[in-house]
Amino acid sequence: MSASKSCSASQLLPTATPTKFRLRLLCLCGLLISIYTLYVKIQLDHDANYKAMCDLAEQVSCTAVFKSDFGRGFGLTRLVFDANSTYLHPSNGSIGIAFYTLLFITSFFESRWLCQLQLLFAVLTLILCVYLGGLLLLVLNDCCVVCVLIYGVHMLLLSEVYGRYKRLYLIKRSIE
C-alpha cells in the first residue's frame, strides 16, 4: 500500500519542472509586456502626440487606451483616490510589473498556502481582464494589441497556477 503511494507521488514529481518553467516563462512575458506598457505611458506623459509601435490603425491603438481614464489603476483607483496622485493612481504597466515580479519570485517556493494565494490572484486578475476587455470593446471601441496579449498571458497563467496547485495538493494527499 505504501509503495503505491510513493509510486503515485513520484509520477507527479517529474511534471514539476515543466510547470515551473512555463509559469516563469509566462511571468517573464507578462513582465516584458508590462514594461513596454509603462514605457509607452511614460512617453505619452511627456509627449501627447507620441505614437507607439502597437498603434496599427485608428481603431487598433494602444495609446488611445493608455491615454484613457482606464490606463491608470484600471480605471478603478480614480473612484477612490485623487486622480492627480501618481502613487495612489499608478499606471497599469507599473501594477503589472509588480504583479509579475512577485509571481515570478513566489514560483520558486512550493508551499500550499502560497500556491493557493497565487491561484486566488490568478483568478482575480483574469476577472480584471474580463472587465478591462469589456471596457475596451464596449466603452473605448478600440482594440489594443498589448491588452489582448496580456489577456492571453493571464488565461495561460491561470491554467499553469491551477495545474501547479493540483500537483502540490495531490502530492501532499498522496504522501499523507
Image: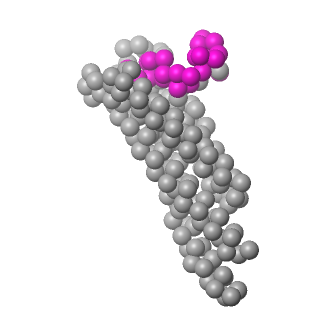
Q: Is residue 161 above or below residue 175?
A: above
Which residue appears at 41% of the width and 13% of the height? 48
Which residue appears at 59% of the width and 13% of the height? 83
Instruction: Find the residue positioned furthest to the right.
Output: 176
Q: Is residue 105 above or below residue 3?
A: above
Residue 45 magenta-drawn? no
Q: Is residue 71 left or right of residue 10?
A: left
Q: Is residue 77 above or below residue 13?
A: above
Asked if one can make out residue 30 in the rendered structure from this viewpoint, the answer is yes
75 vs 20, nearest the viewer: 75
Looking at the rendered image, the quarter that the C terminus falls into is bottom right
Which residue appears at 38% of the width and 37% of the height? 148
Residue 66 magenta-drawn? yes
Residue 162: horizontal and vertical position, in percent?
55, 56
> Over which residues does the magenta segment extend?
63-87
Tell me which secondary structure the magenta stretch mostly adopts.
helix
> Residue 85 falls in which quadrant of the image?
top right
Q: Is residue 82 left or right of residue 126?
A: right
Instruction: Find the residue positioned furthest to the left.
Output: 57
Looking at the rendered image, the quarter that the N terminus falls into is bottom right
Residue 73: horizontal and vertical position, in percent?
56, 24
140 vs 49, nearest the viewer: 140
Residue 70: horizontal and vertical position, in percent?
48, 22
> Residue 16 falls in which quadrant of the image?
bottom right
Asked if one can make out residue 61 in the rendered structure from this viewpoint, the answer is no
46 vs 126, nearest the viewer: 126
114 vs 146, nearest the viewer: 114
